[in-house]
Image: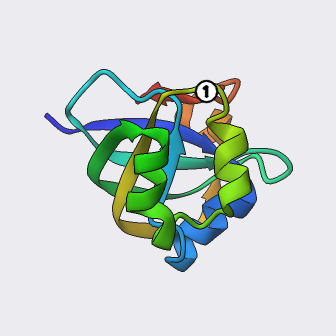
Amino acid sequence: MQTKVLLSIKPEFAERIFLGVKRYEFRKAVFKSPDVKKIIVYASAPTSKVIGEFDVDDILKFEVEELWKRTKEYSGIPKDYFDKYFYGRDIGYAIKIKSSKLYNKPLDLQANFNIKTPPQSFMYL
């Protein structure tokens, strides 16, 4: 069974995903379930709305420098931001985006998903 995850992403990075220039979403930790195939994107403050979704192609797990080498062309972020994000970590993850869909109208967490507070990182739906 396909599992969906609600993922909090900074608005500027979420926008890059839907423009197609960011094809990897970087994480320090990822979900335990191998069945996650769809990500519902919550753009964090100041947007604070669910703005779209994307299908998961693959989840890469590598040492941080190797992860950058494999993803830098479509990372959608500068190297210094990547380095700051993974500072002190040996291993990093990148969710490879297969296809994305921006919603015509952003959705509200409470009204549309019955969720009071957004996840710090992610939550299963």
At 86% from the left and 50% from the top, the residue drawn is: 46
At label 1, the amino acid type is Ile
Q: Residue furthest left?
A: 1
Is residue 76 shown to the viewer in this render?
A: yes
Rendered-image quadrant of the N terminus: top left
Q: Secondary structure at mark 1?
A: loop
At 65% from the left and 62% from the top, the residue drawn is: 77
Is residue 104 shown to the viewer in this render?
A: no
Q: Nearer the viewer, residue 103 or 53?
A: 53
Q: Nearer the viewer, residue 80 or 124?
A: 80
Q: Nearer the viewer, residue 108 or 121?
A: 121
90 is higher (above) or lower (below) than 112: above
Numbered-mark total: 1
At 61% from the left and 70% from the top, the residue drawn is: 16
Q: Position of residue 119 (x, y in %)?
A: 62, 27
Q: Position of residue 52 (x, y in %)?
A: 52, 60
At 32% from the left and 57% from the top, the residue drawn is: 55
Q: Colour mode? A: rainbow
Q: Position of residue 123 (x, y in %)?
A: 49, 26
In the picture, measured across the screen, residue 60 lies left or right of residue 13, that is left
95 is higher (above) or lower (below) than 90: below
Q: Residue furthest right?
A: 46
Q: Residue 91 sits in which quadrant?
A: top left
Q: Position of residue 122 (x, y in %)?
A: 52, 30
Residue matched to label 1: 115
90 is higher (above) or lower (below) than 64: above
Rendered-image quadrant of the C terminus: top left
Q: Residues within 10 Å of mark 1 (few under 14, many from 20)?
A: few
